Image (spheres, rainbow, N blue to C red):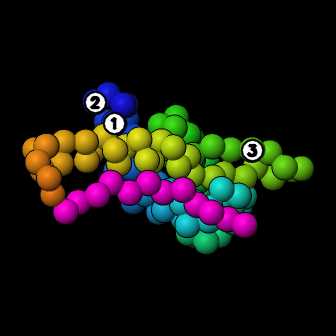
Amino acid sequence: MDNKAAVSILTALAQESRLAVFRLLVEQGPDGLPAGKIGEHLGIPPATLSFHLKELSHAGLVQSRQESRYIFYSANYAAMNNLLGFLTKNCCAGSTCEVTATVCAPNCA
């Protein structure tokens, strides 16, 4: 990941509603949620939610799939983990420290 990509992702998350949407989708796991349920859960009107989902999609943080007449959104864990790795790459100036990088890989059975 380069600086430009990291800034794009961080910019998308630097808004309260988008951050809430992304965190909710991370909690839901790979199956995600339909757009209507996201809006209901967070109290975001459909037009506003559509805008926020578009911004998160353009940053590569969420992906969508259509099932019947519903569009399901889910977190892009690879993008999230790449950002975390980028942010912690030079942790402790390269010296040994207690911080260990974690990777989120939901295990939904």
Tell me where residue 54 appears, x and y as whole percent.
Answer: 57, 41
Mark 2: secondary structure: helix
Q: Which residue is mark 3?
A: 65
Distance from the alpha carbon under mark 1 to that under mark 3: 25 Å
- Magenta residues? 98-109
Q: Which residue is mark 1?
A: 6
Q: Which residue is mark 2?
A: 3
Residue at 45% across, 47% down: 80
Q: Quadrant of residue 49?
A: bottom right
Magenta stretch: includes residue 102: yes
Vertical order, 99 against 61 (above or below): below
Majority SS type along the magenta span: loop
Work out which residue is located at the far front of the displayed protein and give it. Answer: 96
Q: Are marks 1 and 2 in contact (CB under 8 Å)?
A: yes
Residue at 61% across, 71% down: 41
The mark found on residue 44 in the picture is: none
85 vs 78, left or right, is left
Magenta stretch: includes residue 16: no
Mark 3: secondary structure: strand
Residue at 71% across, 58% down: 31
Instruction: Decide: few, some or many residues near mark 2? Use Cα within 10 Å; few <14, some 14-19, many ≥20.
Output: few
Quarter of the figure that contains the N terminus: top left
62 vs 98, left or right, is right
Distance from the alpha carbon under mark 3 to that under mark 2: 29 Å
Disc nearer the start of the sequence (1/3): 1
Tell me where residue 98 appears, x and y as whole percent.
Answer: 19, 63
